[in-house]
Amino acid sequence: MKSSILKTASSYLLPILLLFSLFILLRGHYYPGGGFVGGLIAAIAFVLHSFTNGTDDTLKLLRVHPSAFIPVGLGIAALSMFAPMLVGQPVMTGLWFNEPFPVIGLIGSALFFDIGVYIVVVGVVLTILFTISQYSE
């Protein structure tokens, strides 16, 4: 039996948790947090949606199977790792824009690496959990 209270609450919690995960992603640039923790929070938001609305509805909401996120995230992380080589720097050297962006602050290659990790974590966690839930139904 599905709880109507949980279903209503999850529809409000999904965007709030996703926004919080983005905050943690950006905050991790200077403080604890970052791509891994932000990705886990985003995955939890979709898992909560899946618990209340079903895996099929959550997959429709995502529009793309989460396994497709994994190579995209790995590509972004790899590009951010090897981008310093284009300017004659060693791999994984931090490159930074000279001017800070409003709200975000200084942006560098570490942020793009974190974004790649964020996408990979969301893809891996959701792929595993959705695969398990589809076989248990």
Image (spheres, helix red, strand yellow):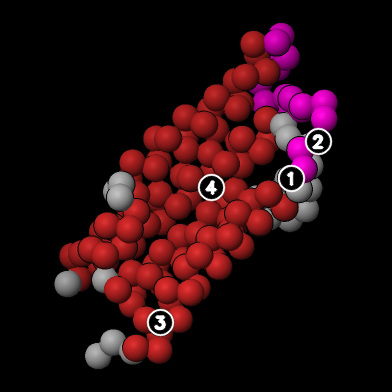
Residue 132 at least partly seen: no
**The image quarter in which residue 104 lies:** top right
Q: Nearer the viewer, residue 5 or 91?
A: 5
**The image quarter in which residue 62 lies:** bottom left
Query: Which amino acid lies under the numbered mark 2 shown in the image of this protein?
Result: Pro
First reached walking from the N terminus: tag 4 or tag 3 = 3
Question: Horizontally, is 34 left or right of 48 in the view?
Answer: right
First reached walking from the N terminus: tag 4 or tag 2 = 2
Instruction: Please name the residue that numbered disc 3 is placed on.
Output: 8
Tell me the magenta residue range: 87-102
Instruction: Please name the residue that numbered disc 1 is placed on.
Output: 104
C-alpha separation, residue under disc 2 versus residue under disc 1: 7 Å
**The image quarter in which residue 37 lies:** bottom right
Please provide percent x and percent y for residue 78: 53, 27
Image height check: is 85 above or below 72?
Answer: above
Q: Residue 118 carries which label?
A: 4
First reached walking from the N terminus: tag 3 or tag 2 = 3
Viewer-side label of 4, 2? 2
Viewer-side label of 4, 1? 1
